[in-house]
Image (tube, rainbow, N blue to C red):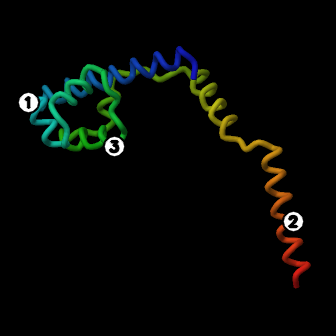
Amino acid sequence: MTPDFGEKTKKLEKHIGQQLRSIRVDKHLTQTQLGTMVGVSSHQIHKYEHGHNRISAGQLFMLANAMGVSVTRFYHGLRPLPDTALASSAASMSQSLRPHTRIEEAVVDLLDAIENAQHRKK
């Protein structure tokens, strides 16, 4: 991940926290009330709202559900990342997930050897 992409992630987390606060205030909920609704402390809600702690996907869903909004509401006002950043990130991930050719060949050779040994026993 490039430093630029990491910086964008931090900005995204801060934006989501600001949206959380805005929605909570619009719903006339205190941090304590919202925290009780989703099973976290008011201090944790404060950390989410100020971007100090990341909100997991599951927790974001719980927060949205508790406040009666769609998860997409937390992303309102964001501009999409340029395609080049997404493509670069996707290519990097794809490359790291691709099996190593030598390992793949060794596994195939091992499976062939096992199969041949089983046929010889019969």
Q: Relative to residue 3, is residue 104 drawn left or right?
A: right
Q: CA distance from mark 3 to mark 1?
A: 23 Å
Residue 35 placement: quadrant: top left
Residue matched to label 1: 28
Task: Return the x and y of residue 114 as percentages of the image width and height.
Answer: 83, 68
Task: Return the x and y of residue 65 as percentages of the image width and height.
Answer: 23, 44
Relative to 110, does residue 86 appear above or below in the rendering?
Answer: above
Task: Return the x and y of residue 68 as percentages of the image width and height.
Answer: 19, 41
Instruction: Tell me the tag on residue 58.
Output: 3
Residue visible at 57% across and 23% down? Answer: 1
Residue visible at 26% across and 43% down? Answer: 62
Give the foreground label among 3 and 1: 3
Q: Element at badge 1?
A: loop
Sequence-earlier tag: 3 or 1: 1
Sequence-earlier tag: 1 or 2: 1
Sequence-earlier tag: 2 or 3: 3
Q: Amino acid at mark 2?
A: Ala
Q: CA distance from mark 2 to mark 3?
A: 45 Å
Q: Amino acid at mark 3?
A: Gly
